[in-house]
Image (tube, rainbow, N blue to C red):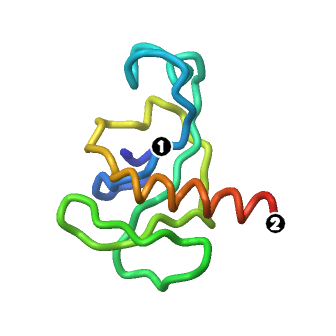
Amino acid sequence: MGTAGKAVGPVRPWLVLYRVEGPGIWGGGRLSQWRTVTVAPMITGSRPAPFRVPVTFQRKTGLILLDQLRIVDKSRLVRRAGGLSDRIVEDTLRTLREVFAG
């Protein structure tokens, strides 16, 4: 995701959280209906916690920080960088359920 306003820095990977209800990631389905999306940062060098999911993405090991969800305008999404394994997606969904369902 790119920076906004006066913020300057590298483009960083984020996990975009949305429910697929139609074909395609950008041109169809639910994501295209909304101006904003919910994202979770994916970073290296952070401490593990129950609400952080371990991930390897683009040959780097890090964490998905589900404790730092943000709502951002879709215009800040620069490009689709790839996908995650089914196991990581399942771990992420399970962790989100635990965080929000208590």
Q: Residue at the right extreme? A: 102
* Total numbered badges shown on the rendered structure: 2
With 81 as the anchor, is 37 left or right in this view? right
Q: Nearer the viewer, mark 2 or mark 1?
A: 2
* Image side of residue 71 versus residue 62, left or right: right
Mark 2 surroundings within 10 Å by alpha-carbon count, few (fewer than 14), some (14 through 19), many (20 or more) = few
Q: Secondary structure at mark 1?
A: strand
Q: Mark 1 packing: few (<14 Cα in 10 Å), some, or many (20+)?
A: many
The residue labelled by disc 2 is 102
Question: Which residue is depicted at the point 44% across and 81% down?
Answer: 46
Q: Is residue 27 above or below residue 96?
A: above
Q: Position of residue 98 (x, y in %)?
A: 71, 64
Query: Mark 1 belongs to which amino acid?
Result: Val
The answer to whether 20 is drawn above or below residue 7 in the figure is above
- Identify which residue is drawn at 33% across, 53% down: 85
Position of the C terminus by quadrant: bottom right
- The extreme left residue here reads 59
Q: Residue furthest bottom?
A: 47
Answer above or below: position of 30 versus 102.
above
Q: Nearer the viewer, residue 82 or 87?
A: 87
Left or right of 38 on screen, residue 48? left
99 relative position to 43: left or right: right
Q: Which mark is residue 16?
A: 1
Q: Nearer the viewer, residue 13 or 75?
A: 13
- Measure how far apart labels 2 and 1 are at the Cα level: 22 Å
x, y percentage for residue 99? 72, 64
Q: Quadrant of residue 58?
A: bottom left
Mark positioned earlier in the residue sequence (2 or 1) = 1
The residue at the point 41 percent across, 62 percent down is: 42
Q: Amino acid at mark 2?
A: Gly
Q: Position of residue 88 (x, y in %)?
A: 42, 59
